[in-house]
Amino acid sequence: MGELKYYLIRRLLTFIPTIIGVTLLTFLIARVIPANPAVLWAGGIKAKPEVVQLLIKKYHLDKPPHIQYFYYLKDIFTGHWGISPVTHRPVIADIATYFPATAELALFSLFVTIFIGIPLGVISALKKDTWIDHVVRIIAISGASMPVFWLGIILQWIFYYSLGLLPATGRGIPPRITYTGLYLLDSLLCGDFEAFRSNLQHIILPGFTLAYPCIGLVARITRSSVLDVLSADFIDYARIRGLKPSFVFRHVFRNASIPIITILGLLFGSLLCGAVITETVFSWPGLGTYTVAAISNIDYPAIMGVTLIIGLVYVTVNLIVDILYAIIDPRIRL
Amino acid sequence: MSGEVLLRVEDLRVYFYTYAGVVKAVDGIDLEVYRGESFALVGETGCGKSTVARAVLRLIPPPGRIVSGRVFFEGRDLLSLPEKELRAIRGADIAYICQDPSSALDPLYTCGYQISETIVSHQGVVKWRDAWMYALKLLKQVAIPEAEKRIKNYPHELSGGMKQRVVISMSIANRPKLLIADEPTTALDVTIQAQIMDLIMELKKLYNTTLLLITHNLGLVAEYCDRVAVMYLGKIVEVADVYTLFEKPLHPYTQGLLKAIPNPLKRVERLYSIPGMIPSPVNLPPGCRFRPRCQFAKDICAREEPPMIEVEPNHYVACWMYAKR
Amino acid sequence: MRLLHILHNWRKRNRARLREYKLMFTALTRSPTAIAGLVLSMSFIILGIVGPYIAPYNPIEIDFEKMHELRLQPPSWEHPFGTDEFGRDLFSRVLCGARISLMVAIVVLSIAIPLGIVLGLIAGYFGGVVDEVIMRVTDVFLSFPGLILAIAFSAAFGASIWSAMAAIALVWWPPYVRVVRGQVLQIKESLFVEAAKALGLNPLKIMFRHILPNALTPVIVLATLDFGSVILVAAALSFIGLGAQPPTPEWGRLVADGRAYFPEKWWYVFFPGLAIFLTALGWNLLGDALRDVLDPRYRRRLEFKERRGR
C-alpha cells in the first residue's frame, strides 16, 4: 500500500498545474479574447458607462494580463465569480442553485449508461459476429450520430404527447427535505416516496436522451476490451489451471474494467455538456437551462462561470478515474 | 520399462480453420505415456507439439477444433467428458507449466492470490486463509527467497525465473498425476534454465508424478527424459527410449535433428541443417510429409503415407525405409 | 503511344499499391453498412454543393402576401417537408442547410486537422521541451469537455455562424495532435527513418515525406468520423442560440425554431433533425468501415476469402 500512497501524492501534485491550466484558459476566454471585456462583463452594449468603469477597476482590466490573471485566480478561489448583469446575483450563487439538478441528471445518465452499455458490450463480445453484435454496433453508430436535442423532442413526442406515459418537462415534486439537491436521493433519504416516484418519472426521458449516445460507445469499448482480455494468455492459463468459472470471470472483469473506467471518466464530461443541450429540451432547471438563458441575455459572467465549473468538475472526475485506475492496476503505481 | 499407461492418445486430429485454409496442426497421432516416467515430445516450432498438449486438456482456441481422436487419462476419455468434470481435472490431476510465465500470470493480482485460487478451485471447501498458508509453503518449496514477502508481490515485481517458479508452484498445488511442461525454459535466461529444469525434476520425484515435456531442445531431452516421441508436421515420426533414439536414430528427420545439435567438443566449419523448407501446413505434400527434404526418398514416399512400424521392441518409426514391403 | 507507355510503367511500378487500393475498394463495397455510409455522405456533399440551385422555393425570403395561407402547412406534394411559420418551404430550407453544414465541417476540419498534424509532428519528432510545451497546451484544451469550451469561445466571439466555426475549430485540434504524435513516436523508431536520418536528409523532408504518409491512417479515420461530429456540434450550438442566426436555414436552428410549434406542427422539427441525424450517420458508418478497411490485417483476411471464393 505504500506505493499507492506515493502515487496518490504524486497524482495530487500534478493536479495543481492542471487547475492552473484550466483557469488560464477560462481567463483567456473571459478577459483576453473579447475586444472589450469590461463591456461584455457588464452585460453588453446596453451596459451603463459607470458600471463598465466600475468593472474595469474591480477586475483590474487596466493592468497587464499577468496581473489580471493573478487577481482572476484570487477571485476564483475566494468565490467571487462575478455578478450576473441579468439576475444581479453572484454567479457562484446561481451555479450553486442550478448545479445539483445538472449533477443529478448527469449521474443518472451515467448509471443508465453503465447498466445498459456494459452488459450490452459483454454480450456482444461473447456473441461476436452474431446478429446481437451487429445490433449493438448499429446502436453505437446511431448514438454517435444522434443530435440529442432532436432525440429528446422525438422521445417527448412518443412518450408524452402520443402515449402519455411519462412527463416531458421539469423535475417533478420536490422532496420534503433537501439535503444534497439531488431530488432522487433526497426523496429516498427522507422517505418521501410520492416525490421519489414523481422524480423518477421525470428523469427517465432526459436521462435516457442524454445517455443514448454514450450507451453505444460504452458497449463498443466494453466489447473490445472484453475480447482483448479473453484472448490474453493469463485467461487461457486460468482455464488451464481449471479455475472455477466465477474466478475466471473475476480476472476478465477486472482487466476489462480498466479501459471502461477510463472512457466513463471522459464520458462524464460529455454528459455534463450534453446536459446543457438536453436540459433545454426538457426544461430541466439546471446549468443548461441557466446557460441557454445566459446566452440569449448576453450574460457573459454566467457563461464563463458555467464553463469554469464544468471544467473543474471534469478534471476532478478524471483525477478520481486515475486514482481508481491505480487501485485496480498495481503497475500504474510505480 | 513399460508399466501402467497413464495417458493414451488415439488417432488425435486437431485442425485449424483459418482464412488461408485448413491447417492440420495435429493429424492423427497415437501416444502412450506411462505412469511415473518422463516423456518428451520433440519437434520444431509449429510442428503441433503444443497443440497436442492443449488437446489433452481440450482447450483448443478457435478457429481450432479437435476433429477426431480419443484421449484416455486413467482410463477415462477426456474428450467425451462433460465440461464440469473436465474442469475438475485441469489444474488438479493434469497440471500445465506454460512457456511464458510473464503472460501467464494476471498482472492485477498478487502471486499469493493466484496460487490460492488454484487451490480453492479444486479442493472443495478450503478457506482462503488456509489456501494462502499453503501457497506460502509451496513458494518455499519452489525455493523462492523471502517467500513471505514475495507472496504479496504482483507479477511485474518479479523476475522471469521467479515468475516461472510461481507458475510451477501453481502447477503442483493440487498434487497432479500428470505434469505437462510446455517449453518451460524457452522464455528464460540461459543461466536459470537448468535451475528450473532441476526444480521440475525434483518436484516430479517428490510428488511422484509423470512428466510430459514438450520441447525443441534435444539437450533437455537427453538429460531429463526416459522416452521420446519426435513430431514432424502434425505426425509422430519416431518413438523410442532416450538411449536408443540418440544412439540409433532411424527416421531421416530424427537423424537430421541430431546432426544439427552443435557438439562443443568438435570444431566444425558449418553446422548441419536439414535441407529444404518446412512445407506450408495448408498444402501438405501427399505421401510422407518429410519426403521433399529427405535424401533417401523413394517413389512410394510420394504416394503413400508410411505406417508406424515397430522396428525393434518399443522402437517405432514411420518411414518406408524400414517397411517390410 | 508514349503516354500509354508511361501509364504502363507507372502501373508496373505501383502494382502493389494499386492492388491494395483495389482491395480497399472491394472491402468497402462488400459491407452494406459501408455502402450506406458512402451513399449518405456522398449525397450530403452533392446536396451541399447543388442544394441551393435545385431548391424549389426561395429558402430565405418571405412572401408576405401569401404568408398567412402558406403558414405552417403540413407536408404535401408542393411542400414535401411542410412550411414554417413564415410560409417558407421547409424542404428548400433543409436543402440549403446542407450547404451550411458542409461549409462548417470543411472549414473547421481544414483548420483543425492541419494544425493538429503539424503540432503532432513537431512534438513527436523533436521531443524534449518542444514536445513538453505542445503537449501541456493540448492537455489544457483536453481538460474541458469540447462542447462547453466551444460554447464559451463562441460566446466570446459573439453569436454568428463564423464565430461558431472558429470556436469549434479551436477545440477540435487537440485529439489530432495526440494521434499524430503517438504515430510519429512509433514510426520514428523504424529503420527507414533511421536510414533517412543517417543519410542526412533534412528534418522537414523526413517529417513530411517519410513519417507523415505512414501516420495518416488513423487521421483519415478520425477525420471521417469527425465530419459527422462537427456537424452535430455546430447544430447543437445553433440550437441553443449560438452559431447561425435567423434567417439562416441552419439545421439546428430550424429544430430550435420549430420547437415552439411542436408537436402539432411536428414536421418543422422532424425533418431538419432527421437531416442532421442521417448526415452524421453517413459519416460515422463510413468512418467505421474505413477503420476496418485501412487495417492491413483485415484486408489480408479478405484477400484469402476472395481467393478461396474463386
Image: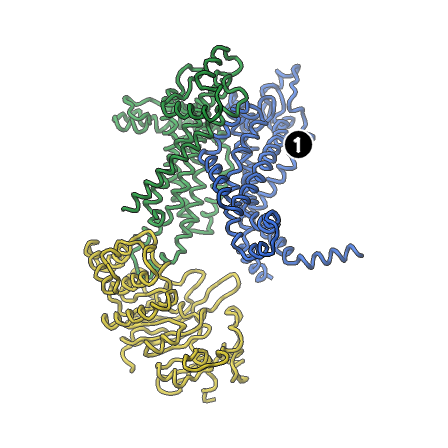
Chain colours: A green, B yellow, C blue
**What's the residue at 63%, 38% (across, down)?**
C43
- Residue C266 in view in this figure: no
Residue that badge 1 annotates? C51
> Badge 1: few (under 14), some or many (20 or more) residues near its Cα, within 10 Å?
many
Front residue (pair A119, B174): B174
In the rendered image, the vertical position of residue C31 relative to residue B25, given as above or below? above
* Residue B195 x %, y %: 31, 69
In the rendered image, the vertical position of residue C109 relative to residue B171, given as above or below? above
Q: Quadrant of residue A187?
A: top left
**What's the residue at 45%, 24% (across, down)?**
A67
Amino acid type assigned to the residue bearing label 1 in the image: Gly
Report the side of C186 relative to A106 (left or right): right
Count of number-bearing discs: 1
The N terminus of chain B lies in quadrant: bottom left
Q: Secondary structure at mark 1?
A: helix
Q: Quadrant of residue B194?
A: bottom left
* Residue A133 x %, y %: 45, 48
Q: Which chain does the residue under circle 1 lie in?
A: C
Farthest residue in the right direction?
C1
* Residue C68 x %, y %: 61, 15
Report the side of A2 relative to A266 (left or right): left
Front residue (pair A222, A85): A85
Farthest residue in the bottom direction?
B324
In the rendered image, the vertical position of residue C298 relative to residue A26, given as above or below? below
Report the side of A53 relative to B180 (left or right): right
* Residue B174 x %, y %: 24, 64
In the rendered image, the vertical position of residue A190 relative to residue B31, given as above or below? above
Front residue (pair A270, C210): C210
Front residue (pair A197, B293): B293
- Residue A45 in view in this figure: yes
**What's the residue at 32%, 60% (across, down)?**
B163
